[in-house]
Image (cartoon, rainbow, N blue to C red):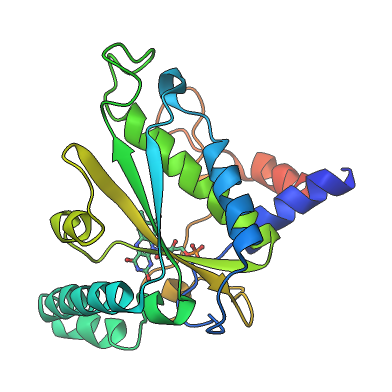
Amino acid sequence: MNEDQVGLYEAIRTRRDVRAEFTGELVDDAVLWRLLEAAHRAPSVGNSQPWDFVVVRDRQTLRRFAGHVADKRREFHAALPPERAATFEPIKIEGIAESGTGIVVTYDHDRGGPQVLGRATVPETGVFSTVLAIQNLWLAATAERIGVGWVSFHDPEFLAELVGLPEGVRPVAWLCVGPVREFQTVPDLERFGWRSGRPLADAVHHERFGAVACSSQADAGAARTL
Ligand SMILES: Cc1cc2nc3c(=O)[nH]c(=O)nc-3n(C[C@H](O)[C@H](O)[C@H](O)COP(=O)(O)O)c2cc1C
C-alpha cells in the first residue's frame, strides 16, 4: 500500500464518535471549510446533491438544542428496564456545548427535480446520499484530527424549527465538530458495556443470506488489511 492508501485506512480505523473528548476550542474556519468540501464531494443519486449544511455557533442556539437533547435522554432513560438504565447512566450522548460548533445536515427531497435518475424505485436513496456526505465529513475530520459526534436524541420538528428549515427540508443529523484531546480506541458504547461490535466474518455472506464467510477466508482478509 502507498502512503495515501495507508492514510485513508488509518482514518477509517481511528474514526470515533466523540462526546467527551472535545477541548472546548473552536475548529478553525479553513479546516471546517475543507470538511464541508469533503462532504460535498460525496456521491449522490442522480447527482442530486440533496444535502445542505447549517453551521451553528450561536451559544444560545447550542444551549437550546442541548436542553432539548437532555430531555430526550431523560425520556429514553426512564423507559429502560432497571439493568439497562444502570448501564446507560454514565454514557454521555452529546458534546454540543463543548464542541462549540454544530453542523445540521439536511435533506431536500425536491432537489434534483421531478425525475431523479436512480431514485424512482428506491426513494430512500436521497437520504442514503446525504448520509454518505456525513461519512465523508467524518473521515476527513478524522484525518484532520478533528472530532465528530452524531446526535440523534431529538425531535426532527424541534431541530427544523430551531435552525429555520424551510418546508420540505428535513434534518438528518446534528454533528458536534471540534478539536479533541484524543480519540478513544474503543467505541464508548463498548467501553461502557452497552453494546459491542460483531466480527466482520459474521456480516459477510456468500451467494445467499445465511452462508457466512468461512474463518480461513476471514483470517486471510484480516492479514491483508488494516
Ligand atoms: C445514525 C447515527 C446516530 C447516532 N446517534 C448518536 C447519539 O445520539 N448520541 C451518541 O452519543 N452517539 C450517536 N451515534 C454514535 C454511535 O453510538 C457510534 O457510532 C457507535 O457506538 C460506534 O462507535 P464509533 O462511531 O466510535 O465507532 C450515532 C451514530 C449514527 C451512525
Relative side of 105 to 188, left or right? left
| Residue 226 in view in this figure | no
Residue nearest the viewer, comparing 83 with 218: 83
Which quadrant does ligand 1 occupy?
bottom left
Residue that sits furthest to the right in the current view: 2
> At 26% from the left edge and 26% from the top edge, which residue is drawn?
110
Q: In which quarter of the image is the N terminus?
A: top right
Residue 44 drawn at (x, y percent): 46, 28
209 lies above or below 40: above
Residue nearest the viewer, comparing 44 with 75: 44
Q: How many labels does the image show?
A: 0
68 lies above or below 103: below
Q: Quadrant of residue 210?
A: top left
| Residue 6 in view in this figure | yes
74 lies above or below 215: below
175 lies above or below 38: below
Residue nearest the viewer, comparing 54 with 203: 54
> At 69% from the left edge and 62% from the top edge, which residue is drawn?
144
Residue 8 drawn at (x, y percent): 73, 49
Relative side of 16 to 196, left or right? right
